[in-house]
Image (tube, grey):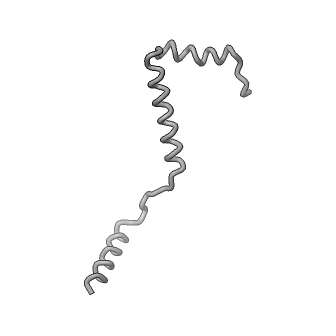
Amino acid sequence: MGNIGFGEFLLIVIVPLLIFGTSRLPALGDALGKTVKNYKREANAPDTINVTPKSAVIEVKAEKDEKGKG
């Protein structure tokens, strides 16, 4: 497992060439590279989802407004 021979490697190279052709293969490789790069960036990014209930946000804003007026 993990060892691929020359025949398998050749098959992996030839099948995409036959399916997509030589003109579209560079564009597909570029798109795949960008996809992997974006996935890695998003997987390592901190979560920034705000899970505060709306009622609590409204109360905090009202308190700030009252302090600013007084």
Residue 21 position, x and y percent, is 47, 14
Q: Is residue 60 above or below residue 14?
A: below
Given residues 64 and 52, the one toward you in this image is 64
Residue 32 position, x and y percent, is 49, 31
- Location of the N terminus (image quadrant): top right
Q: Residue at x 42, y 61 (%)?
A: 50
Give the image quarter of residue 24. Answer: top left
Given residues 59 and 5, the one toward you in this image is 5
Does residue 50 appear left or right of residue 68 in this picture?
Answer: right
Which residue ends up furthest to the bottom in the rendered image?
70
Q: Residue at x 31, y 83 (%)?
A: 67
Q: Is residue 36 above or below residue 58?
A: above
Tell how many labels: 0
Give the image quarter of residue 54. Answer: bottom left
- Location of the C terminus (image quadrant): bottom left
Residue 53 position, x and y percent, is 39, 66
Residue 14 position, x and y percent, is 57, 14
Q: Residue at x 66, y 17 (%)?
A: 8
Q: Residue at x 52, y 17 (%)?
A: 16
Does residue 69 appear left or right of residue 21 in this picture?
Answer: left
